[in-house]
Amino acid sequence: MTGNSDAAYSTAIEKVDSVERAIELLESKELIPGGQSMSLLIIRDGLLHLARAAAPAATTVECLVAFSRIADAVDMELITSEVANQVCHKTMAAYNILDDGIDKLEQTRIELEGCVNRAKEQVRDLEQYRKNIRGEIEKGVEALAEASRQAQKEIQLSAQPGA
């Protein structure tokens, strides 16, 4: 069973209908004594036992919920093991599809995270490149200014009489 917490079983039992409905069902099958206070674990074990008796494939809370919903809809005596197993199988197939979807979403999230990281690296690289270019431009402007000053001095020296 997945998720052995009372909260998970409580949620599953609520999906069946109610704790009272689960207790009635178990009492009607004489799986628990009538009129006693039951813990969620005892109720869960009883429901799982009932589901497994009719549907050996009912090994998860999800299958248990699906089976119990059928039990609410029709007389338990009329449900064949084959039908119950088909319901459990289809329920698990649906959960597997959901799990596959979750796996694909997780893979896509990881791939997108990789793209975002590469984009961040490119932005950092571009920022560094921009800083380097700015530094080179500043050096070039300084060199031009120095060359201009030097040329101006030479022009002034050559323009002086007696040079």
Image (cartoon, rainbow, N blue to C red):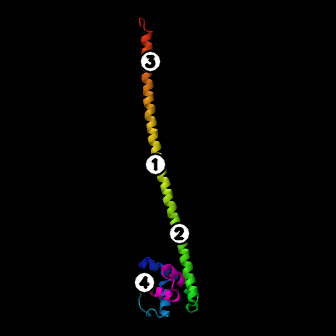
Q: Are marks 2 and 1 in contact (CB under 8 Å)?
A: no
Q: Residue furthest top?
A: 162
The percent coordinates of residue 142 (x first, y second) are 42, 27
- Rounded to the nearest angstrom, the CA distance separating label 4 from label 1 is 53 Å
Nearer to us of marks 4 and 1 is 1
Among the 4 quarters of the image, the one containing residue 81:
bottom right
Which callout, 2 or 1, points at the residue further toward the start of the chain? 2
- Rounded to the nearest angstrom, the CA distance separating label 2 from label 1 is 31 Å
For mark 2, give the secondary structure: helix
Q: Is residue 101 above or below residue 112?
A: below
Say whether residue 66 is magenta. yes
Circle 2 sits on which residue?
A: 100
Nearer to us of marks 4 and 3 is 3
- Rounded to the nearest angstrom, the CA distance separating label 3 from label 1 is 44 Å
Which callout, 4 or 2, points at the residue further toward the start of the chain? 4
Question: Which of the numbered marks, if any, corresponds to residue 40?
Answer: 4
Which callout, 4 or 1, points at the residue further toward the start of the chain? 4
Which callout, 4 or 3, points at the residue further toward the start of the chain? 4
The percent coordinates of residue 151 (x first, y second) are 44, 18
Highlighted magenta segment, given as a residue range? 44-68
Circle 1 sits on which residue?
A: 121
Q: Quadrant of the N terminus?
A: bottom left
Say whether residue 105 is magenta. no
Question: Which of the numbered marks, if any, corresponds to residue 17?
Answer: none
Q: Is residue 50 above or below residue 113?
A: below
For mark 3, give the secondary structure: helix
Circle 2: residue type: Asp
